[in-house]
Amino acid sequence: MSKGKVVVVGAGPGGLTSAMLLATRGFEVQVFEKEPVLGGRNAALKLGDYTFDIGPTFFMMKFILDQIFKETGRQAEDYLDFKLLDPMYRLQFEDREIYISSDTEKMQAEIDRHFPGNEGAVQNFLSREEKRLKKLLPCLQRPYSSWTDLLAPEVLQLLPRLSLGRSLFDVLGDYFSEEQLKLSFTFQAKYLGMSPWECPGAFAIIPFIEHNFGIYHIQGGLNQISEMMGKIVQEEGGQIHTSTPVSKIMVKEKRACGVELEDGTRVEADKVIINADFAHAMNELFDPGVLKKYNSQALERKKYSCSTFMLYLGLDREYDINHHNIVFARNYRENVDDIFKNFKLSDDMSIYIQNPTITDPGLAPAGHSALYILVPIANRQAPVEWNEQQVKYYRDLVLQTIKEKTSLKDIEEHIVQEKAITPLNWEQDFSVYRGATFNLGHNLSQMLYFRPRNRFEELDDCFLVGGGTNPGSGLPTIYESGRIATRLICSDYNLPYDL
């Protein structure tokens, strides 16, 4: 017997997490996704015979996904093929390249080779940041429906470990003295779409998580997580409707009571979960006047992450470079300031290059490569007109930089499939507010209780999941948002969450 009807708006990783957990617990679940495929920014992109992940390519904190699958009575390994990467990634500076490993002995040897005298700092970093993670993780796994949640014992115990008033770059300076070494442990602020000099110091847990737990690839791409979550939803009797856009959240007496589809169909529900981009959803999915706290003027005042310029290239040859590669700008601080303060495009850019076919040859035809290229840039707040001429100019500049700084000298000669995504595409094609790829910024004034809440504060029976709500962006935290929403809904029905 159904425990209740739940509608999920959007089949991104947060919505799919909630959908499969709720379906397993006996709820009648329907997921509505506007695209023909599952995953949102965690979907697959097909260009001819080449397959790419649209968005996330680093997979961390595997233990969280393992827990979520276990909570449906399943093992993640029965659905997904995980490959631990070693080295995790290659960092390329002007004068050296560093191979980063989650094997502590290898990492210490690499640091000793490049930065003599700093190798002992790795163990210090790991031991101290492990204590921070143990305090922080429980706080990222709970809802913040009331300000009194900030007085919970685990939250109060966390306060001394938040490094309040200090940036991620400041905190890493406690461990390492060399500038490039500090950058090697702070560029991860870009995972949140932030500057290392502005990202709160508490996020030192991100490089710790990499070094302590490792980074994985999933055969077929990280998009397979969304595919398998969707499979489980259907195995548990849930329904997934692709190519079915939602035009409006139906509201009656300040309660979300269902959705209206683009074709006019109305679907009633006891609970509504919103997995669309947060600010886009607030602007587009509610009738005027319904929302007060998150009206369009309030949304404009929020801080948002950077955007990204993407190139997906199908190439008719193989390249012997690492699975993950980060090429730093000559003046990294200046490049970061251009993104987050000056809101302009840098000629001197930092570039992330993924070469997944070295690990997963099935993503391209035999002897070919599927390269994923990402350049962090300012969001749509920047006065850049992304017309055809501008896209070609920046695409050529990115490829020229790659040819100058890496071994991919002939890359342009071997392109057989190509697609670019700009901030304008993120905004218009993927419904991402301001093209801010990583959603709301993760400054302390937009975290925990101060971030949009999983139990949506403006409407009853409405829940938020995804990168724009608690606990934040990044796949593991988005999965947690889905798990938090599920626990809240179970509590509304006085149902135990644990099966």
Image (cartoon, rainbow, N blue to C red):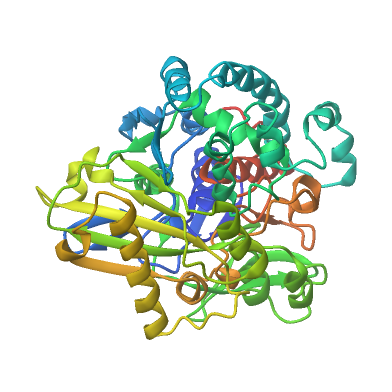
Q: Residue at position x 70%, y 50% from top?
A: 198
**Where's residue 54, x and y in %?**
38, 58
Which is more toward the observer, 240 or 312?
Answer: 312
Taking depth in this image into account, of 81 and 332 the one nearest to the observer is: 332
Along the horizontal axis of the image, is 327 left or right of 142? left
Count of residue discs:
0
Query: Which residue sits at x=31%, y=40%?
Result: 323
- Residue 86, given in percent of the width and then of the height, sits at 35, 27
The correct choice, above or below, for 221 with respect to 10 in the image is above
Residue that appears at 64% across and 62% down: 340
Residue 350: x and y in percent read 46, 55
Quarter of the figure that contains the C terminus: top right
Q: Can residue 345 be seen in this view?
A: yes
Q: Can residue 53 be seen at all in this image of the molecule?
A: no
* Res. 142 image quadrant: top right
Q: Closer to the camera, 356 or 137?
A: 356
* Residue at the left extreme, as displayed: 366
Residue in the image at 68% along x and 40% along y: 168
Q: Quadrant of the N terminus?
A: top right
Which quarter of the figure has residue 102? top left
Q: Is residue 147 left or right of residue 302?
A: right
Vertical comparison of 214 with 304: above or below: above
* Horizontal side, residue 9 vs residue 322: left or right: right
Residue 268 screen position, x and y as percent? 60, 66
